[in-house]
Structures are given as C-alpha cells and as structure tokens.
Image (tube, rainbow, N blue to C red):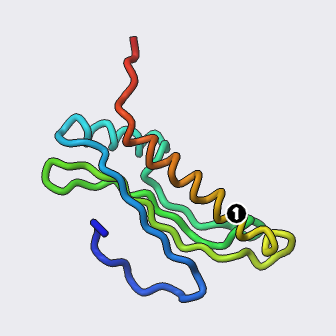
Amino acid sequence: MILEDWTASDARYRRSEVSTFIGSGEAAWRRASAEVLLWKVGFSYRTLPGHPVDGEEAFIVYRRGEDVFLCIRSLTRAAAQQPWRLLFPVLLVAQRVVRRRYLQALSAPPRDSR
C-alpha cells in the first residue's frame, strides 16, 4: 500500500485498494489534476438506497516526490434489497472490471490532440 492506512471500517464491508503509477513530473501531475477536475477520476461517492451494492469509493491522485499515482479505495457489501443480493458475486466482478478501466484511464499516455 502506498498511501497511509485508512481508519478502521465496518467489518461487514469488503475492503479494496488498488494503485497505479501515472507518470513523473509536473506534466503528469497537471494532467492527472485536470482529469480529476473534469470528473474523469479522482472523486469519492457513497451509494444511495436502491443501488445494486452498498458502499463507497474514493479516487485519489497523489504525488510521492516526482512520481504521480492513482489509488482507488472501496468498501462494498451486498445491497439489502432483492434481487441485488443474489447478484452480488457478479456485481463484484463487474466492479473489478470498472476499477481496472479507471486505473487505465489515467495511466495511459495522453492522446495527441492534432
């Protein structure tokens, strides 16, 4: 884990933390910061009643020296209502796929805008 430990959380939730290296230097930091401000990543949210899962997720862009990273932290459990409870294992797989796409979104080099 690259970031400091998070505070204790409810044991009923599955904890996940994944990180990726985005790049080095001021240009990488500016690009990642702009992506956050455009809501591409770098925010946090809590699910609302009726959502397929119950939990929260945070997208954190940070620097260590010249190196820039993206960290995704989540707490997830099955939603209280049916049919989502039965589909929870499938939803966890979908969550991993989406999480991987977020990591790739910022780790990819910027596209040429010409």
Query: Crowding near pointer 1: few (<14 within 10 Å), some, many (20+)?
Result: some
In the current view of this chain or complex, which residue is farthest to the right? 83
Instruction: Measuring from the top left, give residue 105's x and y in whole percent.
Output: 45, 41
In the current view of this chain or complex, which residue is farthest to the top? 114
Q: How many marks?
A: 1
x 36%, y 29%: residue: 110
x 38%, y 83%: residue: 7
Instruction: Tell me where residue 13 sits by quadrant.
Output: bottom right
- The amino acid at mark 1 is Leu
Can you identify the residue that label 1 sits on? 91
Instruction: Measuring from the top left, give residue 26's x and y in whole percent.
Output: 18, 39
Instruction: Measuring from the top left, give residue 40's x and y in whole percent.
Output: 48, 42
Is residue 59 found left or right of 88 in the rendered image? left
x 17%, y 40%: residue: 25
x 39%, y 36%: residue: 108
- Quadrant where the image shows the C terminus: top left
Residue 109 higher or lower than 62, as above or below? above
- Camera-side residue: 38 or 55? 55
**Callout 1: helix, strand or loop?**
helix
- Camera-side residue: 42 or 87? 87
Instruction: Tell me where residue 1 sits by quadrant.
Output: bottom left
Instruction: Measuring from the top left, give residue 95's x and y in whole percent.
Output: 61, 59
